[in-house]
Image (tube, rainbow, N blue to C red):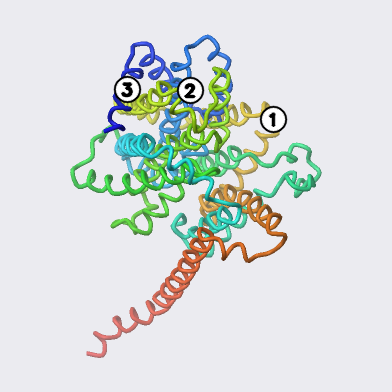
Amino acid sequence: MDVLHNLAFGFSHALTIQNLLYCALGCTVGTLVGLLPGLGPLSTISLLLPLTYSIPTGGALIMLAGIYYGAQYGDSVSAITMKIPHASSIVACIDGYQMTLKGKTGLALFTAGISSFIGGTIAIVVLSTMAPALGEVGFLFGPADYCALMLLGFFCVSFVSSGSLLNGLAMAMVGVLLGMVGTDVNSGVARYTMGLPFLMDGIGLISIALGCFGIAEVVKNLDKKNVLTPFNGKIKLMPTWPEFKRIIPSALRGSVIGSVLGILPGGGPTIAQFAAYAADKRFSKYKHEIGTGCIEGVAGQAAADEAAARTSFIPLMAIGIPENPVMALMMAAFIVKGIQPGPDMIASHPDLFWGLVASMWVGNVFLVVLNVPLVRYWLSVFKIPYTVLFPAIMFFCCVGTFSINNSLDDIYTTAVFGLVGYLFMRLDMEPAPLMLGFILGPMLEENFRRAMLLSRGDFSGFVTRPISATLLSVISIVIIWQTVAFFRTARKNRNKPVIAAAEDAAPVAS
């Protein structure tokens, strides 16, 4: 009953005309930001942060939060329609774009919208009921535990890749090597920079994502002689009842995974989408279709993406620790307004805490009302001739890449990875495991080295800590399961010619 009372108190603040306008403004700006390559919520919030001086405290925080979780849905639109991803919509390029090629763009966008609503709603329930308790979960994880968690992500690479397991592992290792480019945080030594100054800060995630997905897809389509537009003149927006029943389980799984990973420092939407996609490929009833344009491949990652974006507020507001750069900017907004996020925030500023929580659900409704009717307008992009559309995609990729650091070197890097991504496509090597390795590799290295420093080189900490030992046990089970599955598939493929030959010879023998 206390939770219901607190939510009612929060809605009394969130439903004022002023805060409703700020929430709608944040969601609208966030959606538009998500549509533009490279321009994510981090750069947008940093640009708008000075405006918070003249905006009331509650309205400023509600607007900035709306930009953050509103951008998550906008990311999915560009990934599904044009295969131009942001960091939080890389997985949406896999099945979402395949659905676009099948003429099911409207269904894919509706699935992303309704799944985001489900994920956001469940995350808000978690945020409102268990924020103080879950805030302490982050303290339970040490460097060894995070290292084991990142290692588990690597061994789940087969769930992200729809092709060969060896190809997926190879691409993940390439991603790890790319993640090591730049200045070593601990020693200050430049690694794999080839003497190029712009590589001292490492390779940007956006450059790799836009190159391997967006530009590579454009080059691939230009390589074809007959290119037909995916838009067939008919817009199927609402799913059938059987399709809707397929959306719900994946959305619920993604919501739970995103809610959990959003709490952990270093987690957030980027890793949550990969974890949800891996879970769908393992537990979905239609797991064999995922990767070919399956509705579950869109639903799970969209729900996890949105859920993680909201539960990432828990470490900030409950214990005063921002878990990602966007939350660091949100913390700056709190401090600018004279509020110190932490354990005392709920008691000291209940109107701000519960008002922000309630506004997230209001924003959830705004996003559905705003984006679902706009699906028909998003689809109108496919009426544009490819001779105009492709140069426009290339232009937006370059502008988005340049806007991050205002550097032409980033554009050159994106172009290089566009050619590399095209080469991978011709070799049937998927870029998704590469992105997974690029994201997890530096985090794994950092936490491993930190664990070794704290234990003075003693590896026993990985098996004596309960969380780390449990995760390593799960890794062992995954390795055994994947090894058995690999040899079983190899044996089945080896026996196929023999069986086929026997079947062909049977009529002759009779």
Q: Describe the element under mark 2 as helix, strand or loop.
A: helix
Could you say which quadrant of the image residue 133 lies in?
top left
Callout 1–callout 2 Cβ contact below 8 Å: no
In the rendered structure, which disc, 3 or 2, sits on the residue that comes first in sequence?
A: 3
Look at label 3 and name its amino acid. Phe
| The N terminus lies in quadrant | top left
| The C terminus lies in quadrant | bottom left
For marks 1 and 2, give the CA distance.
29 Å
Q: Which of marks 3 and 2 is in front?
A: 3
Q: Which of marks 1 and 2 is in front?
A: 2
Could you say which is closer to the camera, residue 194 or residue 304?
Answer: 304
* Whether residue 175 can be seen here: no
Could you say which is closer to the camera, residue 98 or residue 504?
Answer: 98
Measured as percent of width and height from the top left, residue 475 is found at 50, 64
What numbered label is drawn on residue 64?
Answer: 2
Q: Name the residue at 73% across, 45% down.
A: 185
Q: Name the residue at 37% across, 48% down.
A: 297
In the image, taking residue 418 as reference, residue 156 lies left or right, namely left
In the rendered structure, which disc, 1 or 3, sits on the residue that comes first in sequence?
A: 3
Could you say which quadrant of the image residue 24 lies in?
top left
Q: Is residue 177 above or below residue 508?
A: above
In the image, taking residue 108 as reference, residue 424 lies left or right, namely right
In the image, taking residue 172 as reference, residue 200 lies left or right, namely right
Look at label 2 and name its amino acid. Leu
In the rendered structure, which disc, 1 or 2, sits on the residue that comes first in sequence?
A: 2
Report the residue marked by disc 3: 9
What numbered label is drawn on residue 408?
Answer: 1
Q: Most extreme residue toward the left, as rendered?
A: 241
Measured as percent of width and height from the top left, residue 181 is found at 70, 47
Q: Residues within 10 Å of mark 3 (few under 14, many from 20)?
A: some
